[in-house]
Image: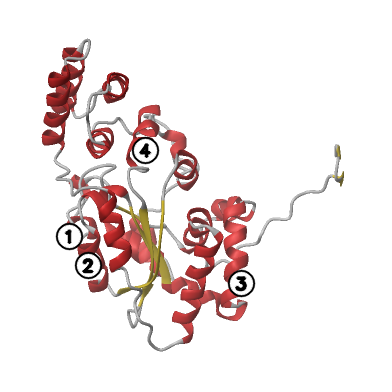
Amino acid sequence: MRPSLYGEARPTMPTVLPEWLTTDARKALLYGHEAYFREAWHDAQTIIGNERLHGLRQFTYVLFKPDAVLARAIGRAIEVLAEEDFRPVSAATFRFDRVLARELWRYELNIATLQRLEAIDVLLPTTDSLLVVLQDIAELPAVPASEKLRLTKGPALKRLRSLEDIRTRIGAHDGMLNFIHCPDDTSDMVREIGLLLAPAARFAAFQAIARALSENAVEPPVLTEAVQRLYRQAADHDMNVSKTLDRIAAAFRASKCPCWQEYVDILDVARRRGHSDWKKALDAAQLHGVPVAKEDWAVVAAACTEPDLPGLETILSKPSPAASAGAAVPA
C-alpha cells in the first residue's frame, strides 16, 4: 500500500447492514461505505437503541417535491396516505440544489440524459420540499413500510398507473411531475434521511421514530404551518403544460426580443412532440429579460424532457413489484 500523510494506509471498514434492512447485496455493500448512510445509521443506533432498531421496518417517508407544492397536493396526499394506514410522525423542509438532487438519485442518474439533469436543476429548487416520516400502523403489515409505500404509490408514468395507486388518487401528473418520492426499502430510508436532512432535523426524525416505537399512541405532527409556509413560496399553479406553453410564448411575443419567433417555434415543438430544446428558450428569456415565472419554466422543463439514454442500466437495479410482493418479511 502507498504511504499516507496520516500514517500507513489501511483498508476501509464498511458498516455491515443487517439483512432486514435490505435484500440487495450490492446496495448493502455500497451503503456500508457511504457517509450519508453511516451517519444516519449511527444516529439511529444512538437514539433508538440496538434492541429496537428492527422497528425501523414500520417506518418510511414521503417526499413532497415542488410540483406537489405548486399543485397544492399535499393535504390530499396526507389523507390518502392515512387511508393506507400511514401516520405522520415528523416533518422537515429543505431546499434542493444540484448536488443534493444528484446524490439522492446517484445510483440511477447514470442513465439520465443531460437534458434531464438540466430539468432537475430547474424543477427541484423552485420551492422548498417537505419530507414527512410515516409509520405504518396496520395491524398485520405484509411487508416493511418502505416497500408497502413503494408498491402502492404507482409509477411515474400515468399510463402505467392503476386507479388504486396513490399518485392517481392525488392527481399527480406525468413523468417528472409525479409529486412524490419515497425510498425503495428500509436501508434507502436511512440513507436518504442522512442525505436530505441536516443533523438537527435528522436527530429530530429519529427521535420521533423512537417515541412512536415507545408509546401506544402518538399525536401526528402539526403539518399545517409547514405546508402553509411552502404554499406562500409559490403561487398555485394549474400544471397544465399547454397553458404554460401559451403563457411563455405570449411573453416572448410581447417582449419583441431578438429572434423571438425562433423561441416561440421551440415551444410549439414541445407542444406537438412532448419534448424540445426548452433550455435554449429559457436561456434566451433570462438573457433578454423576458418575464416568465420560474414555476412555468419548472413545468415545461419537467414535462418536455427526454429522460433516459436508451440501452443502459442503472447502477442499482430497481426492485420489481412482483418480487417485492412475494418477499418474506425479515425477522
Give the mark toward the camera: 4 or 1. Answer: 4
Q: Is residue 149 above or below residue 195?
A: below
CB under 8 Å between callouts 2 and 1? yes
Give the mark toward the camera: 4 or 3. Answer: 4
Query: Could one spot residue 152 in this view of the protein?
Result: no
N-term-proximal mark, 1 vs 3: 3
Mark 4 residue crowding within 10 angstroms, few (<14) / some (14–19) / many (20+): many
Q: Amino acid at mark 1?
A: Arg
Return the residue nearer the eye: 329 or 315: 315
Q: Please tell me which residue is depicted at 49% across the width and 72% down the height of the picture.
A: 56
Give the mark toward the camera: 2 or 4. Answer: 4
Q: Please tell me which residue is depicted at 27% across the width and 36% down the height of the picture.
A: 294
Look at mark 4 in the image and give the residue it sits on.
Answer: 120
N-term-proximal mark, 2 vs 1: 2
Look at mark 2 in the image and give the residue it sits on.
Answer: 80
Q: Please tell me which residue is depicted at 85% across the width and 37% down the height of the picture.
A: 2
N-term-proximal mark, 2 vs 4: 2
Q: What number is the disc on residue 185?
A: none
Q: Is residue 108 left or right of residue 10?
A: left
Q: Secondary structure at mark 4?
A: helix
CB under 8 Å between callouts 4 and 3? no
Look at mark 1 in the image and give the residue it sits on.
Answer: 169
Give the alpha-carbon distance from disc 2 to disc 4, as whole Å.
27 Å
Q: What number is the disc on residue 45?
A: 3
Give the alpha-carbon distance from disc 4 to disc 1, as whole Å.
24 Å
Q: Secondary structure at mark 3?
A: helix
Q: Please tell me which residue is depicted at 38% across the width and 86% down the height of the picture.
A: 217
Query: Could one spot residue 240 in this view of the protein?
Result: yes
Q: Is residue 298 above or below residue 166?
A: above
